[in-house]
Amino acid sequence: MGAWLTMWTRKAAFTLVAGLSLILIGMMISNFQMMILGFTFIAFITVNSWMSGHGDIEVQRTLSADNLYKGDDLYVELLVINRSLRRTQTLEVFDNVPHEMKLRSGLNQMRLDLKPGESARIRYVLRCPLRGHYTIGPVSLRHRNTFNLGVDEMRVDHHSDIVVFPQVKDVEEAFLRSRTPKMYTGATTLRTPGQGSEFYSLREYVPGDPFKSINWKAFARTGELMVNEKCRDAVTDVFILLDAREIARVGTVLKNPLEMGCVSAASLASFFLQRRDSVALAVYGDGLSYLPPDTGDKQYFKILSNLAGVQHRGEMPLQAVTNSISGRFSRGSPVFIISSVEGDGTVPAAVRDLVGRGHDVTVLTPSSIDFERLVSRIPRLSYEVLRMERQNRLTTLAGAGAQVIDWMPDMDLAQALMQVRGY
């Protein structure tokens, strides 16, 4: 807890000036009654400054969750306890919240008058409309003394960190209906012994084998220790490349290529991880952030946490990304490129290079010119010209061997994924 900072109010300043004025005027005209009245004002201020009623305040904050998804509600409870042996008198409590969050119900501030040992709870609900990493706090305390002559302020250095993940859409039905190759089969079972879940064969026990692998029914039947061998599972490595360049900020705060890209990246990662595939994420903008392929819930939350902190900046070309991580691509692994493909002339060459190496490439491209129409008026003729140029770029990508998805701002992700076409 920090130290209290004491400040005078206008009322105290006026009282002090009035007291000094009465003393000076009384001395000038030799009026002792006026001088006594002035000394009374000053004595009143002095005695009042000695009367401190804020005491020792303890603050505790409880959140309904540390991690949540974009658009969810966060429930916050603030517990204020008076640990001193005095009343707090008028105590104002204000919990600082990020300006990106909206107060949905309740209040994050309250005036309290707590007895010794008494506590009070402040409850409110925040709506989280934007993904990101946020901090709630500190807590500001303000105490006014009895006659409102002084104000004591303090900040309690109590912070609560939360991560707002991008929304995760259900895309499984869309993939089943689309013409996406059937190579995305999830974890597949190989007919070779190894780590897995399906039974392969029985073999004799060898010292060092785990006891949980012993087949006790076979032991009871044959009298010899036998162990179960499993079929080894193999997974598909899926690579997701997300464009976070400066151009991805075109549109509104809630609707722009980067926001839609984060939603699609999170949704695709969730889809493939649920099928026990291995997913890697590369985000490029002012540099390259790479998360190696892995499986399971741990990888899922790593991907969501990375996507929560993505910001639009930089001009890194796609080919620089593919050249940088080309050695990490698994042979024949599918690659998803999520980009508006605007302002980057290296995209066709990068796609052609990936396809030439045997990768199945899908380009999911939010339409930046349609996002721009959300915030500015584009003449119809200019829009048609820009639209035609965009179609030519997408046709070039399709000619390079990629599957291209043109994603409009008013189109749901599942709808977009069902429109995979070759242009």
Image: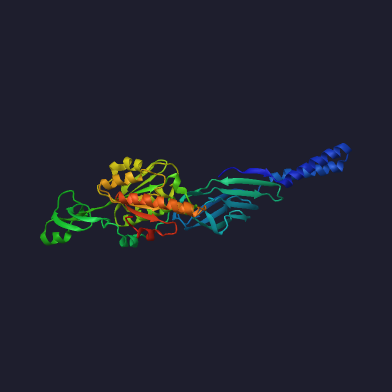
* Residue plotted at (29% across, 53% down): 277
Percent from the top left, x then y, of residue 372? 48, 52
- In the image, taking residue 376 as reference, residue 337 lies left or right, namely left
Name the one closer to the observer, 151 or 262.
262
* Residue located farthest toward the front when viewing the structure as drawn: 381
- Residue 327 can be seen, yes or no: yes
- In the image, taking residue 21 as reference, residue 108 lies left or right, namely left
- In the image, taking residue 51 as reference, residue 380 lies left or right, namely left
Q: Residue 289 is drawn in which quadrant?
A: top left
- Residue 301 can be seen, yes or no: no
Percent from the top left, x then y, of residue 407? 40, 56
Name the one closer to the observer, 423 or 138.
423
Name the one closer to the observer, 323 or 399.
399
Q: Residue 198 is drawn in which quadrant?
A: bottom left
Percent from the top left, x then y, of residue 383? 46, 53
**Image vertical order of residue 204 relative to residue 319, above or below:** below
- In the image, taking residue 115 as reference, residue 409 lies left or right, namely left
Percent from the top left, x then y, of residue 20? 79, 40
Name the one closer to the observer, 119 or 98.
98
User: What is the basis of the colouring in this image?
Assistant: rainbow
Q: Quadrant of the C terminus?
A: bottom left
* Residue located farthest toward the left when viewing the structure as drawn: 222
Q: Quadrant of the N terminus?
A: top right
Circle count: 0
* Residue plotted at (84% across, 41% down): 35
* Residue plotted at (85% across, 43% down): 34
